[in-house]
Image (cartoon, grey):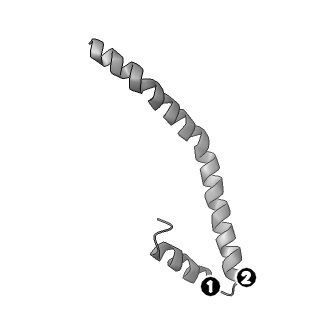
Amino acid sequence: MEEMLKLAANYGFPMVIAFYVLARLEPVIKELQKSVTVLTVVVARQGGVDYEEARKLVEGNGFVK
């Protein structure tokens, strides 16, 4: 029982903080993902590359999953 309390004290707090930070950053990450998608379309159009072709190139290289 004492060992379980030590484990909770040593690992519980960092886990709670990690989940809190992830929950707070999730909307920011989603907004950044939308921005990257829009910028990909803009750059592809300016470069004369079809968006679908650019998406296949990026996905094929393992950048986007």
Q: Residue furthest bottom?
A: 48
Residue corresponding to mark 2: 46
Number of numbered callouts drawn = 2
Q: Amino acid at mark 1?
A: Asp
Question: Which residue is found at the position 40% from the left and 19% from the top?
Answer: 9
- Of labels 1 and 2, the one closer to you: 2
Disc 2 crowd, CA 10 A, few/some/many (<14, 14-19, 20+): few
Q: Amino acid at mark 2?
A: Gln
Question: Which residue is found at the position 42% from the left and 25% from the top?
Answer: 12
Whether 61 is drawn above or below 16: the answer is: below
Whole-percent x, y for residue 24 in the image: 60, 39
Question: Which residue is found at the position 54% from the left and 33% from the top?
Answer: 20
Disc 1 crowd, CA 10 A, few/some/many (<14, 14-19, 20+): few
Q: Mark 2: which secondary structure?
A: helix
Q: Quadrant of residue 45?
A: bottom right
Question: Which residue is found at the position 66% from the left and 80% from the top?
Answer: 44
- Judge left or right: residue 6 versus residue 40: left
Task: Find the distance from the CA under tag 1 to the CA under tag 2.
Answer: 10 Å
Whether 21 is drawn above or below 62: the answer is: above
Whole-percent x, y for residue 38 in the image: 68, 68
Towards the viewer: 47 or 38: 47
Q: Quadrant of residue 21?
A: top right
Whether 40 is drawn above or below 16: the answer is: below
Residue corresponding to mark 1: 50
Whole-percent x, y for residue 57 in the image: 52, 79
Q: Mark 1: which secondary structure?
A: loop
Q: Residue furthest top?
A: 2
- Judge left or right: residue 45 versus residue 18: right
